[in-house]
Image: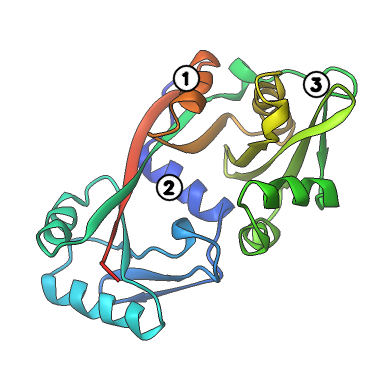
Amino acid sequence: MIPPGAGALFAALDATWPAAGVSVEHGFHLCDGAGGGKRVSAARATGPVTPDQVQVAAAAMRAQGAAPLFMIRPGDDPLDALLDARGYDAMDATVLMAAPVAQIAAAPAPVTLFPIWPPLQIMRDIWTANGIGAARQAVMDRAPPPKTALIARVSDRAAGTAFVACHGDIAMLHAVEVLPGLRRQGAARNMLTGAAWWAQVQGCAWLALAVTRANSGARALYRTMGMAEVCSYHYRVAHA
């Protein structure tokens, strides 16, 4: 099967991890992330932009009390070069990976994994303990259905949690977190196969996710599960 292209993957990423608000101004989608992190706060070019448009978009972000932040997607090389020349720092190189759900999906073994929405408090506590606080959890709350959270259990304990939502025939997996003391015991693998199993029930053909290049351990796991890198993005941020 030919994996979905970059455009379809970014559309699914935006739909399943949505900003609180988006306006189209100065050649960019300007996003109100409501404190939910870079992915929902960064400006995205709608097409080729001029240096003046970049300057105006940056001023608009500063007027909202935020350092100018731009997401650099495939095809944004001229914007990337322009921001680099203006001293913007590159950060958080990230890849989008995808695989057919049929290749990964497996029904969870008894009491090892449960899809639950809304999330239980223990699931929210795991996210919070791993840096995914209330503002990022609010991103999941405002994502449209179909969606679910997953809770993985190891040795009769809640070990990890994740969020998955659908857009078209793509299910996007987000916020995969496992408690430090319970890692390397299969929880992450179970959430990946369980997310694909849930997505298959929803009628999705593909499971996709975003993972930073720096997270080599997670990328290695995803590759062993048959996921392939399709495209990438990074950010450019102005000095404070």
Instruction: Please tell me the numbered disc located at residue 10.
Output: 2
Question: Would you identify the image quadrant in which residue 109 lies?
Answer: top right
Residue at point 36%, 40% (across, down): 6
Towards the viewer: 162 or 46: 162
In the displayed structure image, the side of residue 134 where residue 88 appears, left or right: left
Residue at point 75%, 38% (across, down): 150
| Number of numbered tags placed on the structure image | 3
Image marks 1 and 2: residues in contact by CB distance under 8 Å: no
- Measured in 3D between alpha carbons, the distance from the residue under mark 3 to the one under mark 2, in whole angstroms, is 29 Å
Instruction: Please tell me the numbered disc located at residue 108.
Output: 3
Looking at the rendered image, the disc whose residue lies closer to the viewer, 1 or 2, is 1
Towards the viewer: 239 or 78: 239
- Secondary structure at badge 2 equals helix
Q: Provide residue 130's location: percent of width, then percent of height.
A: 64, 46
Residue holding disc 1: 220
Image: 26 above or below 89? below
Hey, what amino acid is under mark 2?
Phe
- Secondary structure at badge 1 equals helix
* Mark with earlier residue (1, 3): 3
Residue at point 24%, 56% (across, down): 89
- Secondary structure at badge 3 equals loop
Hey, what amino acid is under mark 1?
Ala
The residue furthest bottom is 63
